[in-house]
Image: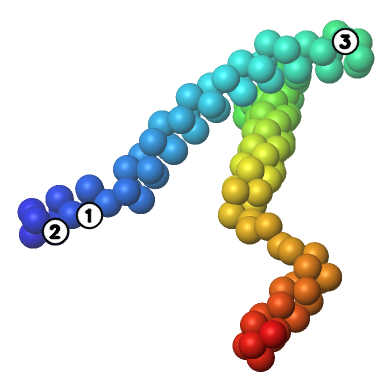
Amino acid sequence: MIKEFKEFISRGNVIDLAVGVIIGSAFTTIVKSLVDYLINPLIGLFIGGIDFSDWVFKIAGATFRVGSFLNAVINFLIIAFVVFILVKVVNKFVSKKNEEPVAAPEVQLLEEIRDLLKENGK
């Protein structure tokens, strides 16, 4: 069982996943700072200097922090957008690297004619 566990852990996918989780966590901290310290104050300028985190309402002793929820939604949207852009950029580089140059149809036709002439001994 220990041998199987070692094989499982030493697979590239598990290690790549662990690295991805660690980088994702660090990246989330950066994006949260961006939202809290730059985006929210900027939005606050346009809507009269209101800080979302202060938006609360109370019903029967329960406190609903609507502003904190809005901050979380903005945070999610920014993270999703940044990940979308990163995936697009990575896909662009990967697809360019994996594409083989495709010859024009005329070139392919000329190559076929050449090969047929070689087969016929001319």
Residue at point 38%, 43% (across, down): 16
Q: Which residue is mark 2?
A: 4
Is 103 situated above or below 16? below
| Residue at the limit of the structure toward the front, as seen here | 122
Give how far across and how far down residue 120 sits, in percent: 66, 91
* Whether residue 112 can be seen here: no
Residue at point 71%, 62% (across, down): 102
Q: Give, as a three-letter code, the residue at label 1.
A: Phe
Label 3 crowd (10 A; few <14 / some 14-19 / many >=20): few
User: Picture quarter containing residue 80?
Assistant: top right
| Residue at the limit of the structure toward the left, as seen here | 2
User: Picture quarter containing residue 3?
Assistant: bottom left
Q: Which residue is mark 1?
A: 8
Disc 2 or disc 3, which is closer to the eye?
2
* Whether residue 36 can be seen here: yes
Is 34 situated above or below 75? above
Disc 1 or disc 3, which is closer to the eye?
1
Q: Give, as a three-letter code, the residue at label 2.
A: Glu
Residue at point 64%, 56% (across, down): 99
Number of marks in the image? 3
